[in-house]
Image (spheres, coloured by chain):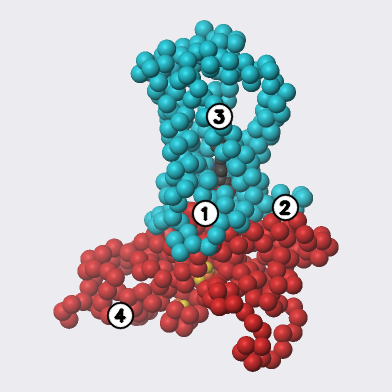
Amino acid sequence: MLKFWDSSVGKKVVMGLTGLILVGFVIGHMAGNLQIFLGMERYNAYAKLLQEDLIEVTWAVRVVLFVSVVLHALSAWQLTRRSWAARPVEYDMREAQVSTYASRTMRWGGVFLFVFIVLHIGQFTLGWKWLLPEFARGAAYGNVVLAFERPLWVAFYLVAMFFLLLHLFHGTWAVLRTLGLARNAAEPLQRRVPLIIAIVVTVGFSLVPLGVALGIVR
Amino acid sequence: MSGTMNIKLKVWRQAGPKAPGKFEEYTATEVSPESSFLEMLDVVNEKLVLEGKDPIAFDHDCREGICGMCGMMINGVAHGPSKLTTTCQLHMRSFKDGDSITLEPWRAKAFPVIRDLVVDRSPLDRIIQAGGFISVATGSPQDANALPISKMDADEAMDAAACIGCGACVAACPNASVSLFTAAKISHLGLLPQGQPERYRRALSMVAQMDLEGFGGCTLFGECMAACPKGISIDFIKRMNGDYIWGAITEKPEKVTLGSG
Ligand code: HEM
Ligand code: SF4
Ligand code: FES
């Protein structure tokens, strides 16, 4: 067990498994959020379901997600340190040949996603006043509308979704290889399904701040 | 002579492993487009020797793309601009008159520079020593069809066995990861019946050794595959990961050899 965690492949597998859990979560979370377009009543009822009626389930999910994010970020951090140490003298010149922009932004994009996750939870779940002074417990719909009436928050969420798009584009493709599950391919670098997943998830999420900003949701 | 080229070279010069290195500039004059890249360097070196200077050290042996000795970063690309080509098989017709070419050694903590463009690639040997073999005597060659092997497996094993151990995958990888080499060596044995008994133990031992040598981890950038003169596919890395996971689940701890070095 310890030897597994010590090895670069083992850490990557942990990153992949926890990443998969997070992918499953973001798909469900995105679908749930879209209920905002069904009106305040429906949306607040959904929020109440998660916050009161199913609170035990919610807590179980929260624990799994918390552990996943911590392990995911920890393995990412440690592997990044190892990679940096593996090339102490940089090239004067090294030209990327086939690596995607997405793959090259996994690390800093991941850091941004981490900051986003903290602020997002602080804003809508914990109700930190400095993020959303008008936050009211139990008024999920109102909180969302109040937040996204501010262009700065809309912009911040859209930037985060851009990084999520990149992260999912590389991540959902890479994870099948990390876990040894993908099939051999003539063009192993080609990825279509990951692109679809990444677009569906990020567009779905982005519709909410955009809906408020455009006055469709108010 | 008409049709020849003048090429500006910027070359990493380093007297020894501990010595500080720096770039030096040279001009290769009257280079024939038909000459190979290493022949161009030979001519530059002859001139340097005549001038009483140290020639540029670079690794090479077969000069026909099969031994894996040669290799350097050529304008930021491992083995230079031709796909599926070792440095020794690169020809000057890939360049134009007046081009500037930057030459650097493979850069990785695990590949210390010995001199100029020559690096120590013995970590690759130690990764093989850690498990890249079959322990039982498999006998003298049998009749070709005595041991049935599917055409697909045979082809795939041959694709993996094409690796010549040049180290370009490490050089090109932003993580300085040796995963492509290790995966190729694990797979060409693991795909064949003779390699089955040690398949998962092999993956555990060889991965442990590559970590021990100080290479980075794989992030599936894909740069290794683009640099590899033998076109080794990153599908083998996926296979190595799968073998490693299964080995971690099934292999009894005392069977795992820890690797040397
Ligand atoms: C907490 C902030 C996060 C950080 C710091 C982070 C960082 C990283 C890094 C550095 C990688 C490795 C890239 C590679 O090896 O190619 C990675 C992979 C991945 N991430 Fe994240 N990430 C974060 C959040 C997320 C989220 C929210 C999701 C899901 C929506 C996610 C899903 C994935 C997946 C599926 C992979 C692929 C794993 C693999 O290659 O096997 N990550 N992440
Ligand atoms: S996998 Fe390709 S690039 Fe890497 S050592 Fe083998 S032949 Fe060279
Ligand atoms: S010198 Fe043998 S492969 Fe280039």
Q: Quadrant of residue A159?
A: top left
- Judging by colour alone, the chain drawn in cyan in this rendered image is A
Q: Is residue A188 left or right of residue B236?
A: left
Q: Point out which mark residue B220 bears.
A: 1
The residue identified by callout 3 is: A29
Q: Are marks 1 and 2 on the same chain?
A: no
Mark 1 close to ligand 1, CB under 8 Å: yes
Host chain of mark 1: B
Residue at image location 44% in from the left, 45% down from the top = A195
Counting residues from the N terminus, which is met first, the one under dot 1 or under dot 4?
4
Q: Which mark is residue B35?
A: 4
Q: Where in the figure is residue B254, as x and y percent of width and height?
A: 83, 63
Q: Are marks 2 and 3 on the same chain?
A: yes
Circles 1 and 4, Cβ within 8 Å, touching? The answer is: no
Q: Is residue B30 above or below residue A85?
A: below
Coordinates of residue A174 in the picture (x, y in percent): 54, 50
Q: Which mark is residue B163?
A: none
Q: Is residue B132 left or right of residue B100?
A: right
Q: Nearer the viewer, mark 3 or mark 4?
A: 3
> Is residue B152 in sight in this rendering?
yes
- Between the C-alphas of marks 1 and 4, the distance is 36 Å
Label 4's element? loop
Numbered disc in front, either 2 or 3: 3
The chain letter under disc 3 is A
- In the displayed structure, A105 sits above or below B52; it is above
> Disc number at residue A4?
2
